[in-house]
Amino acid sequence: METAPREAAQVGPALDGFLLRGRATPTPRQLEEVGVRADSLREVTAAEFLRTMAEESYDVLVLALVGGGVQAMLHGLGRVWEDRPSRPVVVTGYVGVVYEKLADGLLLRHGADLVLANSRQDADRFRAVYEGVGADASSVTEVALPFLGGDAYEGEHDPSAKQGRRPYTVVFAAQPSVPESRKDRTYLLNRLVQHARRHPEREVLLKLRSRPGEHTTHIEELPYQKLVQRLDPPANFRLVYGNMGEVLDRTDLLVTVSSTAALESLHRRIPTVVLTDLGVREALGNHHFVGSGCLASWDQLDAGHRPAPDEEWVSRQGVVADGSYESAFDAARERIAKLLDRPGGLPPLTPYYTPVTAPGYLPGILARHHLGPDGTPLPGAPAADREPGPVRQIVRRAARGAYRHGVQRVAPVIRRMGEL
């Protein structure tokens, strides 16, 4: 998704949102959870978006996309802005922690004016990658994790209280693609249900990222909603959706494999556990939490263990539990303001990847968004000059539903057949 703030006359900044059409286009429910209201919002193809950027004037453009999408848009924008005397400040970055594809994801984002690093640790790593390949690292700007907030944890509620007190609440934050196998996901689900049976006085919640048919950045082929149908969970076990912050408002213990929800929880000083049951492995992402003090197993939790986080580790992860969260974004604000006031405007966008530095990689990335090697939309690229009519909207929804069904239902069956 791209969002583009611009200055509106005497009424403060206006926010126009553009949803890049694809498998990960957010649903209305997912957009509602974000909490940011755009003044205008529409779904576009890459060609439609680039044409709008060529015709309209904005101050700041935020590319909130996966790495390949960012790289494609940087090249496309460089093309449509090449004859303009001024252009917006381009910002990109990551939503959560970066524990995989560090070099790949970073170099695909190189070329933006600001590449936001959500922690001191990420800022150091980002600069090292850019400098290590001879790319300009000045765009790396340290901030904090963008989704933190909420009140600090006040401690467990008295389980003996009869009236007006909620039960002790354990929340397992699920992830769409970690772990991947049915065996591992079933194991985690069984342990969670067993914990609910072992502690009938507690409320045990399985917090899910998306409802069936919705997508996030990662594809979920074995949704927990489907796996839980084979079990008979107790009455104190429930599935929950919605904003993670609202769920954390009632959480006494947060458990996960490697979700960024762990960092939200640590920010609020909620007891937090990163599971070791399936090992501490790069494939799971829980290796990121080595040194955190939060690693533990379900056996340890069932026995009453509560990890104590390492404060130095927490402070390096963009978790601002000391109350200084608002000031964590001052450096980004100041950098944007300086770039907006730069005499003579901003220089052309210069991504590290070009037809010279990556001739066997870049053209494929651009082609996925119907762009040629120079960033120009290819002939026949999908681009409409007007909003889709009712028939087109129905066909598009049907096609997207068929695609998601194929990803979530058909493709896993084909893969399993291939393993026979």
Image: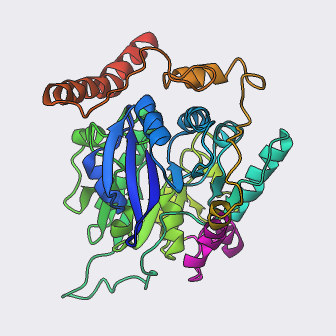
Given residues 379 and 152, the one toward you in this image is 379
Q: Is residue 214 left or right of residue 321?
A: left
Numbered circles on residues, count: 0
- Going 33% across and 39% down the picture, which residue do you hit? 43
Depth check, front residue: 202 or 56: 56
Where residue 395 appears, x then y in whole percent? Answer: 20, 24
Question: Eyeballing the image, is 283 above or below 199?
Answer: above
- For the residue pair 226 and 91, the one nearer the viewer reads as 91
Horizontal relation, residue 208 to residue 284: left or right: left
Residue interval drawn in magenta? 307-335
Residue at image coords 59%, 81%: 324
Residue 96 percent across, percent down from the top left:
54, 55
* Residue nearest the observer in this picture, 144 or 109: 109
Question: Whole-percent x and y of residue 282?
Answer: 64, 42
In the rendered image, residue 328 lying in the magenta stretch gets the answer yes
From the top left corner, tell me how far across and down residue 203 is, in percent: 28, 67
224 is higher (above) or lower (below) than 5: above
In the visual, does 136 lie left or right of 261?
Answer: right
